[in-house]
Amino acid sequence: MIRELLANSSPHPGFAKWLKNKDLIRISAAVINNIANGESPAAHLDFLLPAEEFKIIRKNDKIYVDPRSYKRYNRAAAIFSSLDSAVIMSLYRQAKPLIEEAFKDLGFPREEFDDTLRRAITILLQVPVIEKKIELEEKVTTYALKDPALEKLTPAQKHLLRMGPGNTKKIQAKLKEISDQL
């Protein structure tokens, strides 16, 4: 039923792949809960992980995010931004009892899912859109953001930041639409 109702919520051909996942409501509840708590939702979104590797640029003894890395997320951002917010919110209202049940199954019997959803949206809307080069600091097996303010972002916020300024703007615009209807 959920897949049928969601089928008309996006004209993007890639959205059909998203709908093939099992437990759409449980996954969505877990992802939103993770984001609301500042945690990475990546464990629930393996179907969205980019196939390409993260790229850097080394220049004058400094390391920067290679803007080509942002392109790895273009498809995910395009699909998300193609969602019809009115259809999504109508479905949300219809499926709310199922969503609440899935949320309670995650171990949050006293918390309202609407509050968690609002908190998740607010957290992602707080991510700054960085148009300039983002400097990195090399760690043992990964990179940290050189700017302490950016490094203090939650893992969920850093995921959105790493999608690049264009994709961040698209996703935040859609989140604002959804938030306005919530």
Image (cartoon, helix red, strand yellow):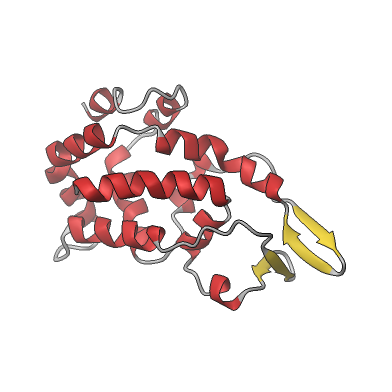
Residue 98 rendering spot, x and y as whole percentages: 16, 43
Q: Residue at x 55, y 43 (%)?
A: 49
Please provide percent x and percent y for residue 59. Answer: 85, 62
Nearest to the observer: residue 131 or residue 55: 131
Q: Check the image and report above or below for 63 versus 45.
A: below
Q: Quadrant of the N terminus?
A: top left
Res 160 seen here: yes
Residue at the extreme bottom: 148
Which corner quadrant of the image does residue 63 belong to?
A: bottom right
* Quarter of the figure with residue 52: top right
Compared to residue 123, the image places residue 5 above or below, namely: above
Left or right, residue 49 beside residue 127: right
Query: Looking at the image, which is closer to me, 11 or 104?
Result: 11
User: Can residue 50 be spotted in the picture?
Assistant: no
Residue 94 position (above or below residue 154)? above
Q: In which quarter of the image is residue 136?
A: bottom right
Instruction: Tell me where residue 151 appears, x and y as whole percent.
Output: 57, 72
Spot the residue most to the right: 60
In front of the other: 123 or 39: 123
Residue 19 percent coordinates (x, y)? 37, 29
